């Protein structure tokens, strides 16, 4: 009779989970900018996702940082696609100093991320927006952009091994910046990164966090300081739950105590990411079988969800501006970097994209 008891266990667990969710509240959406500003009243760091390649996401961020309520509360924006090797250039530029464009563009062109779809305009637009904000302030304070990408010098990167040593720092380096530049100085910061960097437990390691490879910016910063990062997850336009269909955009909704918060976090990351899980034992990485997949509730990983609309406003995959394609040596150097860090088709995509642009 014992096997029959065990076979009933999954049904019992499902029944209990359903009963628990039935007693939970619905999500309560608020205006996204007002909600983020209010969250800064009780949080020093708010993690706002950057949906790479999304014009919608970029436009929302600019609207947020230009809002006077945000400017009056926040000190720093920690940004993903900016090389920290050039922090001094960024500081000088946003303070209003003159910085030669050929130097300034190193911030977003010389990074650990070299792909055919890099959107250099995102970082350039952020720096320009902050520079304009600082120029118009009357209180003498300045908003700072903290560059989060590891301090790579691509001219010295000649092999995959060279590149890997910087890729390993993609979470630990910005986490250290949060500790030294924000938390230790008692400042408030907006952490603006791809949202997988915000996981408290990494779904790809099946939520096992003993390996350094599993750590994220948020897991490292919270473990090092005890401070809690308020994390926001942007709902993918192709995966919008039914309860959000009637929401105007942009909207922010806390998830704690809601039926949505009790859902499996795997529902938010998409089937491909959720199904690719690995265990790490020393230097051995092995796939985790689906029957061993762990479940973690959304509210254990995320503090709020961000809804920017049902339709994707993603910009085209190839975002290299025409003037870059025509710059002497640019395509050759980018292809060299891509071959050290990305799948081979990325180099072909860049070559084809720039070839289609042609001469002016």
Image (spheres, rainbow, N blue to C red):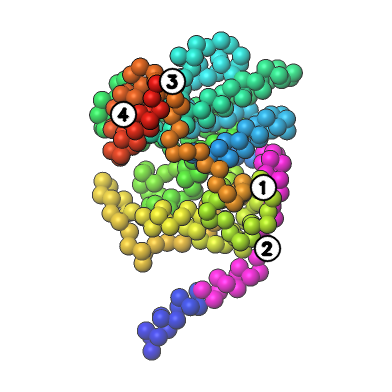
Residue with the most extreme bottom position: 1
Residue labelled with disc 2: 25
Q: Is residue 24 magenta?
A: yes
* Residue 176 drawn above or below residue 85: below
Query: Residue at horizontal 54%, vertical 76%?
Result: 15
Tell which circle, 2 or 4, labels the residue nearer the N-terminal end.
Answer: 2
Q: Position of residue 136 (x, y in %)?
A: 71, 19
Residue labelled with disc 4: 335
Residue 249 shows which numbered tag?
1
Q: Tell me the element at label 2.
A: loop
Tell which circle, 1 or 4, labels the residue nearer the N-terminal end.
Answer: 1
Q: Main secondary structure of the magenta part?
A: helix
Q: Tell me the element at label 1.
A: loop
Quadrant placement of the C terminus: top left
Residue labelled with disc 3: 360
Query: Residue at horizontal 49%, vertical 48%?
Result: 200
Does residue 12 appear in the picture of this structure?
Answer: yes
Tell which circle, 1 or 3, labels the residue nearer the N-terminal end.
Answer: 1
Label 3 – label 4 distance at C-alpha: 22 Å
Total number of numbered discs in the rendering: 4
């Amino acid at each position: 009779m014992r096997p029959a008891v065990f076979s009933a266990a999954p049904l019992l667990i499902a029944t209990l989970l359903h009963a628990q969710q039935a007693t939970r509240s619905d999500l309560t959406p608020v205006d996204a900018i007002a909600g983020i500003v209010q969250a800064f009243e009780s949080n020093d760091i708010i993690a706002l996702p950057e949906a790479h390649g999304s014009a919608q996401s970029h436009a929302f961020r600019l609207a947020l940082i230009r809002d006077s309520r945000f400017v009056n509360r926040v000190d720093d924006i920690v940004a993903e696609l900016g090389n920290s090797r050039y922090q001094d250039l960024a500081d000088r530029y946003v303070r209003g100093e003159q910085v030669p464009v050929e130097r300034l563009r190193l911030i977003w062109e010389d990074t650990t991320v070299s792909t055919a779809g890099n959107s250099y305009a995102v970082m350039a637009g952020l720096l320009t927006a902050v520079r304009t904000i600082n120029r118009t302030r009357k209180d003498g304070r300045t908003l700072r952009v903290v560059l989060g990408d590891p301090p790579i010098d691509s001219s010295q990167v000649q092999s995959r091994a060279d590149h890997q040593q910087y890729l390993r720092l993609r979470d630990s380096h910005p986490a250290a910046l949060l500790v030294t530049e924000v938390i230790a100085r008692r400042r408030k910061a907006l952490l603006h990164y791809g949202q997988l960097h915000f996981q408290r437990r990494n779904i790809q390691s099946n939520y096992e966090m003993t390996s350094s490879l599993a750590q994220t910016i948020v897991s490292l910063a919270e473990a090092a300081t005890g401070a809690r990062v308020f994390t926001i997850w942007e709902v993918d336009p192709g995966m919008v739950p039914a309860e959000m269909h009637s929401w105007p955009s942009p909207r922010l909704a806390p998830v704690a105590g809601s039926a949505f918060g009790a859902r499996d976090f795997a529902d938010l990351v998409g089937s491909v990411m959720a199904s690719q899980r690995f265990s790490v034992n020393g230097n051995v990485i092995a796939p985790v079988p689906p029957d061993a997949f762990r479940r973690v509730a959304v509210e254990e990983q995320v503090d709020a969800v961000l809804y920017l609309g049902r339709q994707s406003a993603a910009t085209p995959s190839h975002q290299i501006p025409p003037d870059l394609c025509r710059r002497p040596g640019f395509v050759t150097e980018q292809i060299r970097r891509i071959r050290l860090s990305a799948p081979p088709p990325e180099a072909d995509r860049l070559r084809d994209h720039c070839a289609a642009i042609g001469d002016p």
